[in-house]
Image (cartoon, helix red, strand yellow):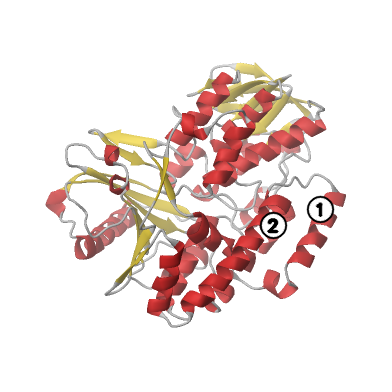
Amino acid sequence: MKAVVVGAGLGGLSVAACLAKAGVDVTILEKNSWVGGRVHKWVHKGVRFDLGPSWYLMPKEVDRWFHALGFDRKQFYEIHRLDPAYKVIYDGESLVVPGNINKVFELFESVEQGAGERLQFHLSNNAREYHYLMENFIRSNYNSARTILRKGMEILRFFEYSSLMSNFHSRIKKVAYDPKLQKILEYSSTFLGASPYTLPAPYTILNHVDFNLGTWYPLGGFSVLPEAMAKICRLLGVTIHCNEEVEMLELKRNTISHVHSKSTTYQADLVVANADRHFVDQVLLPPKYREMKERQWNALPISPSVFNIFLGVKDTLNNLAHHTFFFDSDWDKHITSVYKRKEWPLDPLFYVHCPAKTDPAAAHNDVQSLFILVPLAPGVQDSPVERNRIYERVLQRLRLHANISEHTISFSKIEGPREYKLHFNAYKSNAFGLAMTLGQTAMLRLSNRSQKVKNLYFSGQYTIPGTGTTMSIISGELSAERIIQEMSLS
């Protein structure tokens, strides 16, 4: 059997390796010159930047993928737990969040009496919920009405109805009353592409991921992860073609027969699309085989886009941690600009990644890499004027809090919604896939199999609850599991 995987993002690499291990002849077609999709790097004047994800979370789940294929992640790269985990800068003060859970309790207690004890109770419940959801819902295929009904009843029994109907922020308010501590507990909601005021309360399991499981970093930069996965793919017999952009899926009746790239045609018995789901549906497929109309796509809640700044800095950056959040402007105004007003924020919150704090190889000749991310509304119109305005405002605050001056910046680069559309065909230039609303959770997510095309499956963040590198990898495992079961490949 010949399978073609469209897109060499983490979900595509994951499903390809799993199918190859089951004996399928797999070819990956990737439009860009690198593997990893949004997980890639930029090296300029010897200075290395992570251009996409910079948070390595849930390491045991990643290791599980390697082990399932007969490998040990340690054969390919090392990971290092961060301590401090991150720093948060507020207006006039800052807090450093330790990598040690007991010290986190002490920090919360020092800011607000009773908050440390409440956090301990909260994280205990989080841990229970995390393990239950991972084993019973995240790692599940919803490929039959019976399964959907059974899983739905289980989740109603596990969670109180009031918990499912409440939001992330409501639950966090019961843990900490101090706004500074609330922001520490809520920042993770931005990784799920939703406001803490709309994100379902059970997603506070990310607090368990943050504090109990810890924040890690792969030495050598984030690109070591997809590079390791690609190496495993090749060892299992997968063929990977980069710079091979797919233009059309050819069908005979309701079955894909060939995949056409700009230069070559590939025969396919099976296709797994790891490219942007909207792009596959509205561009690669003929109109009669599309699952939704454009107006239906437009109605779906989509995760934010981002504006990124990359700086090469000649500075020790003593006032920054490996991860630093700038919450020194109005939190609610930025949230409103992203999720309600759909406009560029006037005075943005932002996140700074300084990997040389952990991995000296990220720096070169006393120049360190600094990556800055500003969340934007999905579909916001890209604008040179807005780019320059946000750049200057961010630099102004960096000068104030991190002692970075204009003469210490060796070089800079910026990317925004336009680049996400160009590189990844990202619908509304989104950075994280579907937003995490109650109507897009677990069995209510888009299916990882086409309803109209017999041999078309999907992997990636449109098909699994949650966002990020680990969830993308799990999405590939689930797609492969379903394909193997439904096509009797086991």
Q: Position of residue 108 (x, y in %)?
A: 42, 74
Q: Quadrant of residue 202?
A: bottom right
Q: Position of residue 277 (x, y in %)?
A: 62, 42
The quarter in which the C terminus is drawn is: top right
Q: Residue furthest right?
A: 146
Amino acid residing under circle 2: Tyr
* Residue 385 in the figure: left or right of residue 479: left
Amino acid residing under circle 1: Ile
Q: Which residue is mark 1?
A: 148
Residue at (72, 40) in percent of width and height: 290
SS assignment at label 1: helix
Residue at (54, 32) in percent of width and height: 72
Q: Is residue 97 visible?
A: yes
Q: Is residue 197 visible?
A: no
Q: Position of residue 99 (x, y in %)?
A: 41, 58
Instruction: Tell me, for residue 132, which label it has, or none.
Output: 2
Q: Residue furthest front?
A: 102
Q: Mark 1: give few (<14), some (14-19) or many (20+) Cα within 10 Å.
A: some
Give above or below for 412 relative to 42. below
Residue at (74, 19) in percent of width and height: 1
Residue at (33, 57) in percent of width and height: 386
Q: Position of residue 9 (x, y in %)?
A: 53, 35
Disc 2 to disc 1, C-alpha distance: 17 Å
Give above or below for 225 relative to 461. above
SS assignment at label 2: helix
